[in-house]
Image: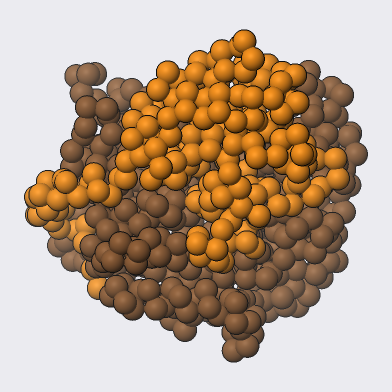
Chain colours: A brown, B orange
Amino acid sequence: MADTARTIIDKIWDAHAITTREDGQSLLWVDRHLLHEGSFLAFDQLAAREARVARPDLTFGVADHYVPTRNRDAIVPEIRGMVEQLVGNCAEHGITLFGLDDRRQGIVHVTMPAQGLTLPGLIVVCGDSHTSTHGALGAYAFGIGASEVAHVMMTQTIWQKRPRRMRISVDGRLPPGSTAKDIALTVIARIGTDGAQGHAIEFAGSAIRGLSMEGRLTLCNLSIEAGGRLGLVAPDETTFAYLRGRPFAPRGDAFERAVEDWRALASDRDAPFDREVVLDAASIAPTVTWGTSPEQALPIAATVPDPDRVADHGSAQAVRDALAYMGLTPGMALGDIRIDRVFIGSCTNSRIEDLRAAAAVLAGRRAAVPGLVSPGSSQVKRQAEEEGLDRIFRDAGLEWVESGCSMCVGMNGDIVPPGERCASTTNRNFKGRQGPGARTHLMSPAMVAAAAIAGRLTDMRPLLAGRTP
Amino acid sequence: MKPFVTLSTRACPLPVANVDTDQLIPARFMKQPRSAGYGAFLLHDLRREPGNAAAVLDDPRHAGAQVLVARRNFGCGSSREAAVYALADHGIRCVIAPSFGDIFASNAVKNGLLPARLPEEQVDELLQDALVLGGGPIEVDLPSQTIRVGNKVFAFEIEPVWKTQLVNGWDDIDMTRSYAAEIERFAAQDAAARPWAAPAG
């Protein structure tokens, strides 16, 4: 029956295809549409057509991209306007909004899964490339542009071409200190930021199965940095246990019925993939980026590359350009790179387990540089405070602030000053990403915590000796 | 949407790979409505960086260029359609590169901007071509999928669906509305088949 064996990617696709045209484009049903302040461009398109949101009951908004993380009582008018625009648009169209004062406010890719709005087998879209995050729950989730957001608003559907399928298998046991972030950076360094272009990724293998739901969210979040349309993990007991009892997840018999359907989503044994990538978990070390693209990542014990030793002219030029921007010399040890500040937050690494991992390193220690800790949601913030994690961060000298996209993208004014270097738990080390002239090094929360203490990039494993991470 | 058939213009060579959408338009410029125009923000920080190749945008030899030639993975990164607005409002109607970020390419087509794919070696050839470097004429013909520079002709690739859409200036939403009955039927059947898919609460 090899001919009919299907991947989870195809099973979800087939269940959502309303029609398929001769040119191969399918019109897909959308189960959840998530909005944020940036969605104003799409609302403007709707207004220009005098159109309405077709299914406000399947549309959810949250304020995250522009929200201030400090002094929410004294917001500058320009930023206030961005949030008020979202409030007004959601109210006009009858869309549920987790606004600034809502207990559920947070980064869209942190708070929506935590609310049980993301479920296995759903198609989830949002005008944000990190929508791939939701694939952790076995959802088919991808980022779209403003015109597509407007299309989904008006029709609850989207035109897509069936993606090629890629399976990334990670087998074996991750060494202590290596995390989902390190798996992701290792994969991206291996296949490149366009390695998964045109593909939907299924993450599989024992090391992936062994990840917690929060680890899977981090991993799938970074699928887009490998160029993937989306990345997902087939739902399993970890998924079901995570979802049970979440506010918007099905309840009682409906939940049990759903679990039956969800179990059937896993890729069939002989399902064909267009590309396979296999990694040995044991070989994955704590990893940091040194350049201006997420593919420019290396294990912490490595040295900065020398462009003169790069054979390909174009690549050598890219290395030279990245080193010039980052202010680094070829051949220097990554562990010798001094930093000016740290940031712990973003849709990649701001959940409770991330904060616990950073706090385990920081407890009883002082940071040598200033830094910001922004929990992924107001809910995560409350939980961290109940656990006393906020005290650990504060006692270490870091700022404990409200939830939002914050210093990952700098839209709310939380930026890294020009020329400064930041160890960051975020997803993009692009030039200027954290502010004009800012230099970003991506790594896991525990690695950022270690960098904060050392004042330079460093291996966090010695700092964890004798501690429970 | 304005149809894209042929283009007779000059090109801007940008010999850089992985030009991400944060470079195309830094996040701080995305607060304004589209009607205010995004052209001034195109590659805002990169073209001001000393010695950066993006300074070509301000080179008088390439003034008014409607074609941009770049290396692989152009438009990777975020889903911000403002990256396309910045290009389009600056006057760029076609980007030639070996590959594009998926979301960027889709956004481009929705705004009448042609993402034309050429093999890496041919992009290199274009980037070193004296006519391209000197701001000489370049022609893009979408129906025949060709790019002409002097006596050289390059055949580019584009998704057939996108080609049809660009050539006709079609709008997705009007097309989708013609499927209203199918959508309604699907939604009803689906609600019965997957009762758990509706948000509880």
- Residue A423 figure quarter: bottom right
Q: Which residue appears at 28% of the width and 49% of the height?
A: B173
Instruction: Evaluate whether residue B19 shows in this view.
Output: yes
- A200 w.r.t. A409: above or below: above
- Quadrant of image for the C terminus of chain A: bottom right
Please tell me which residue lies in front, A319 or B177. Answer: B177
In the image, farthest residue toward the bottom? A73
Task: Give coordinates of residue A73: x percent, y percent.
Answer: 59, 89
- A163 w.r.t. A465: above or below: above
Instruction: Evaluate whether residue A35 shows in this view.
Output: no
Please tell me which residue lies in front, B34 or A248. Answer: B34
Task: Give coordinates of residue B166: x percent, y percent.
Answer: 39, 35
Give left or right: position of A453 versus A18. Answer: right
Q: Which residue appears at 48% of the width and 34% of the height?
A: B114
- Quadrant of image for the N terminus of chain A: top left
Please tell me which residue lies in front, A284 or A33. Answer: A33
